Image (spheres, rainbow, N blue to C red):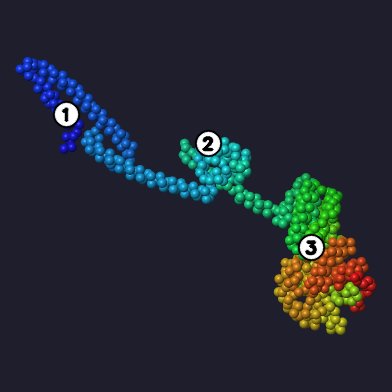
Amino acid sequence: MSHWLAPSRIIPLLLAAWLLLVGAWLWPSYDPAAGIDLLAVLQEYAVALVISLVVLIGLCLLIVVIIRSVQQPVDNLERHLGDVLHHVSDTVPIQDEPLLLVTERINRIIDLLRRENTRLSRQLEQQQQLAKKQSQILQSLELVIWEVDAGQTHISAIQGPAERLFHHTEDTWREPEFFKHYLHVEDYHKLRDRLQQTAAATQSVRYELRLRDGKDEWRWVQIDLTLLGQSTVQRHVGVLQDITAAKQHQQQAVISRQNDALTGIGNRVWFIEQLETRLEYARHQRAPGALFFLDLDRFEFSNSVFGQAVGDQFLQRFAAYLAELFSESGVVGRLGGDEFGVILPNTSSEQAIEYVNQLLSTLHRLQFAHEGSYVPFSTSVGIALFPEHGSEPYALLTRAAVALRQAKARGRGTHQLASGIQDDNQETGDAAAWEKRLREAVDYDLFTLYFQPIIDLDIGVIHYYECLLRLIEPNGRAYGPGLFMNAAEHLGLRDVIEQRALVSAIRAQGIGNRSGHPVSLTINLSNRQLNQADLVSQIRMTVKEQHAKPQRIVFEINAKSAANNMLRIRQVVTELRKDGFRFAWDDFGVGALSFADLRSVPFDYIKIDGDLTTKIVWSPADRAMVKAIVDLAQGLDMALMAESVETEHMLRILRDDHVTFGQGRLFADPAPRFHEHERIIVPENQRTT
């Protein structure tokens, strides 16, 4: 029955019904008896029919308009949602369907729209969650992502913690001149040129740029920039990261590699690089220059007496004075330990001497104060000139080091200008110069022992003889180990020489026992010997073979080089003391031994360094150091020996300071035989009370 409801059926039926209604309405008005003419009735009927027809037509047109108005939005909706409603595309046009079908289709469309809306809402929610996660990732990684249209220089979009990291609002980032205003001028031009490129290449580039943040502080940023999109629509996508902390760490690492960690001035590596640069400049410009090699006097002693922490402060203060004195004229660096270097470009020999005299004079007026004690800043200086004494860094440093040793040999607190290369070879024991003599000495046993008596300073009785190694040439000239031992080590002969010296010393003690004239000896053990695994067994075997008495032998261990070998020293001393051997710290006052080291190893004697002994006559500071050593020895229950006693004045001071034993030229020079008397005549001065 649905086809009867179609407009093509309804309109004719309505028209026929209307004609019948009009006729029924007019027919009762016809009455022949009343004289009403039939023609008049028909005329009225025709007029009414026309009027009704017009009204009916208008009504039909209204219905059509209403139907059309409903159909048009539906058609538009169908066109816009074609991809959603493609499965209903085979339906007949609305204007040919009954109204009920139109309603059904509309309901179906509404249902589909609801489902699509649900799907789109879910998709939108997922996208929002994804964007939130992306934002969280950017926040945690502290990354900022921004976009710039190709050919432009202003940011069109930005994501990430830009405001938190750099204190610029999003509006500020989007300003047309942001990069120009906030990037360093050198970095801005580099980035601008890249942003204005529109080439098809999409290869990423990385920049490290300086950006001024909202607090007007410069920050280092890293930007990874990529060009994306087609040739017609392109954009630059940048990933920005704050690398200020990494840059500061990198710069600090560079400073750490160049600067000495303790004093803050240049370290050895940096100093040698600077020296190489100055030497290269001097070669090209034919300009002179000078190199100072400085070594603090008695620093090891101060370090051992006051402790390492105070010693570090001493070095820091000295380095500060040195840097201040040469801030305008030279380059200052720490070469290691208590050694420093100064480079003076464009400096003649006369000017170098003048500089070093000013340095020593200034330091002489300065003192390091610690808890009521005052220690002078005393240093010795070796001077090498370039290009006169060398044009290579290490060669020049060697020449300056040789001059430094020569200065110290003259009494410390002085300076020495480097001499000729031949003289330096003789002083340092150059391997090439000594090779022939050393090999002949080993082959023909030209080494011998000299003996210097160590006496009781009160009564002059000889208690010990120190065994001193000498190389005797055919002409009778004797050389001490300080001249040839470095060369012997370079040639691989040092172990042989030291082993023969040790055996000879023990043999000398055994010979005295067998001859009825026993002597007590002190024998030097080097660090190299101490580190030999079989040292203890060798000593025990030699003592047994030579019939020596351990109770009459004192082994001297150099305090200057002992600090880094305390574990091995403790092992050797512990073993040999079981046999009756005794031990002494040699050259005490120039080493870096701590109080803990002194307490941990049971030694019997402390032998004061000869440099301290020679200066007690005129240096109150050195006299105070000797007194401190005396107090230290008494506290540790050790006896004291003093080296290099050369004058009666020294002897009186040592007696007054309660030093028990002494050796030096005042009593006897080293000789290849023992002294003919058991007692040496000394001045009859008594200890003062």
**Gap in Å between the C-alphas at discs 1 and 3?**
130 Å
Picture coordinates of residue 48, whole percent (x, y): 16, 21
Disc 3 on helix, strand or loop? helix
Q: Is residue 267 visible?
A: no
Quadrant holding the N terminus: top left
Q: Amino acid at mark 2?
A: Gly
Quadrant holding the C terminus: bottom right
Q: Amino acid at mark 1?
A: Leu
Residue situated in front as seen by the camera: 632 or 47: 47
**Gap in Å between the C-alphas at discs 2 and 3?**
70 Å
What residue sits right under mark 2 in the picture? 151
Indicate which label's residue lies in the foreground, 1 or 2: 1
Picture coordinates of residue 236, whole percent (x, y): 51, 41
Q: Amino acid at mark 3?
A: Ser
What residue sits right under mark 1 in the picture? 14
> Left or right: where does residue 96 sit relative to residue 342?
left
Q: Residue at x 35, y 45 (%)?
A: 118
